[in-house]
Image (cartoon, rainbow, N blue to C red):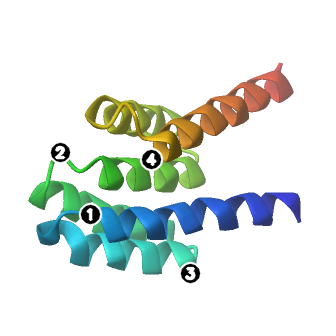
Amino acid sequence: MKRRVLWGIVLAVLVTFAACARNMATGPINDGVAAANEEDWEKAVQHWTKALELTPDSAAAHNNLAVAYERQGSWEQAAKEYETALRLDPDNAQIRGNYESFKGRLEAGRKRKS
């Protein structure tokens, strides 16, 4: 239950970022949010990748793509996208919070494996 609430919060952040996206990428970002709401992470990745083709410097799209990769278990790709999002928008508290939470989940996963 706790996990569902956490991911609900993450999805709410994605919706917020969709509203802040640049015009060219708004369609694919919104489509990615819709896919994420359905927990169709493969489609979300496709949409957010398309958004980055249109607007490569979109911190929102990089953040959203990081969330999708994380949900798919693609930890290295997720880390890369979170780091890119932070490089593009270092003062964004939501991106920073997502990244910090990701690092916590990553560390917890490593501890479980050892």
Disc 1 vs disc 4: Cβ atoms closer than 8 Å?
Answer: no
Residue at screen point 68% across, 67% down: 8
Residue at screen point 18% across, 63% down: 22
Cα–Cα span, label 4 and label 3: 17 Å
Q: Identify which amino acid the numbered label 3 is placed on.
A: Glu
Disc 4 vs disc 3: Cβ atoms closer than 8 Å?
Answer: no
Counting residues from the start of the chain, the first of labels 4 and 3 encountered is: 3
On the image, numbered disc 4 is attached to which residue? 66
Cα–Cα span, label 3 and label 1: 21 Å
Residue at screen point 56% across, 43% down: 98
Foreground residue, 37 or 19?
19
Counting residues from the start of the chain, the first of labels 2 and 1 encountered is: 1
Circle 2 residues within 10 Å: few <14, some 14–19, many ≥20? some
Q: Identify which amino acid the numbered label 2 is placed on.
A: Asp
Q: Can residue 47 be seen in this view?
A: yes
On the image, numbered disc 3 is attached to which residue? 38
The nearer-to-camera label among 2 and 1 is 1
Describe the element under mark 3 as helix, strand or loop: loop
Q: Identify which amino acid the numbered label 1 is placed on.
A: Ala
Residue at screen point 35% across, 71% down: 19
On the image, numbered disc 2 is attached to which residue? 57
Foreground residue, 52 or 58?
58
Describe the element under mark 2 as helix, strand or loop: loop
Numbered circle sitting on residue 21: 1
Counting residues from the start of the chain, the first of labels 3 and 1 encountered is: 1
